[in-house]
Image (cartoon, grey):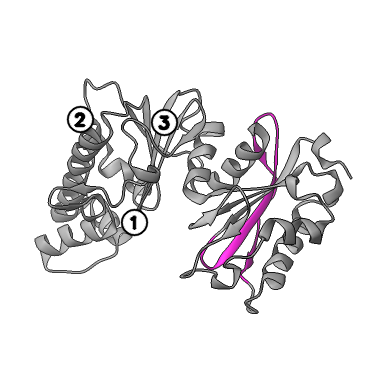
Amino acid sequence: MNGKLGRTVIVYDVGGSHISAAVCREPDYELGTIRRAQLPVEETVKAFVGVLQSLAGQVAADTNSMAGASLAMPGPFDYARGISFMQHKLPYLFGRDLRQAFADSLEWVPDQIKFLNDAAAYMLGEIGAGAAKDFSRVVVLTLGTGVGSGFAIDGTVQTEGEGVPPGGEIWNVPYEGGIVEDQISTRALQKSYRDRTGNRAEVAAIAAAATTEKAAAEVFAEFGHTLGKAIKALLTDFAPDVVVLGGGIARSAKLFLPEAQSELAGLGMDLRVAKLDESAPLVGAGVHWLRG
């Protein structure tokens, strides 16, 4: 079967508790119906590949008509060879050739299957069909429990070079006496709220209170200024045309985006919110395969 003749691929987003899948089509990277499945109870490569195969059958009636498959995976992972080096997550995949195992299950050739980092997939999704479309130099920041990041030039992921932190990862870059994640993450917002009120609350609850509670509104305004200053300090050397904000915190962007934008005035950086949200890694996996 020569699946490479087609221009539709099966795309996957492998998370900590479940796997999402869909088909992705050229030319606009449109997704079909998204299906989800829990990670297998049986912790073996065979069981994991079985979930992938089952999802493939759900999203693509005829897998032989697919050009291939693209999987967004957390690291550490050898994306070129399809071999996981994760030990804290999915340890049963450690050192195993996932590309060959999955290809065998579908009766495909291994070259039809590609892998990429999940943060890079999120960014490529926004570049291909989201908020970063038509921009040359792009940075994507996902703000939540941690800070995910991705750098790209003309649609190519950058993990080194001027202005790019090692591996393109910004979360642990030294900043303000600590690291970046100390300043622009869930815990930073929660600490700010606790310092003002003495109360502990989830970010969603703080955001909901911001329309009526002064302290909650101040927390997000301060977060916006902190974010803008961090972007200015950390990304000026890379000089992105656009910085796209995703992740759970970005869903409350109306509460902090104006303050962040004010810190970046005159720098030529367009700061905007991601459009694709949770579907971004799936779209990005399709971009990775179809453009690759």
Mark 2 vs mark 3, CA separation in Å: 19 Å
Relative to residue 8, is residue 81 drawn left or right?
A: left
How crowded pointer 1 is (Cα within 10 Å; few <14, some 14-19, many 20+) is rated as some
Please state which amino acid type lies under the numbered disc 2. Ser
Check contact, mark 2 vs mark 1: CB within 8 A: no
Does residue 34 appear anywhere in the picture? Answer: no
- Tags 2 and 3 touching, CB below 8 Å: no
Query: What's the residue at 21%, 24% (across, down)?
Result: 265
Residue 262, numbered label? 2
Q: Which residues are magenta?
A: 15-39
Choose the circle earlier in sequence order: 2 or 3: 3
Between residues 178 and 99, which one lies in front from this camera angle? 99
Q: Position of residue 157 (x, y in %)?
A: 48, 36
| Circle nearer the N terminus (2, 1) | 1
Label 2: element kind? helix
Name the amino acid type tagged 3. Answer: Val
Q: Amino acid at mark 1?
A: Gly
Task: Decide if residue 36 is on the left or right side of residue 129.
Answer: right
User: Circle 3: is it few (<14), some (14-19), or many (20+) Cα within 10 Å?
Assistant: many
Please check the rendered image and state whether residue 14 is part of the magenta-colored stretch, yes or no: no
Q: Residues within 10 Å of mark 2 (few under 14, many from 20)?
A: few
As drawn, 142 above or below 291: below
The residue indicated by pointer 3 is 138
Work out whether residue 78 or residue 126 is closer to the camera in this orientation and state it.
78
Q: Are marks 1 and 3 in contact (CB under 8 Å)?
A: no
Residue 102: x %, y % from top left = 73, 59
- Foreground disc of the pair 2, 3: 3
245 up-or-down from 179: above or below: above
Q: Which residue is mark 1?
A: 146
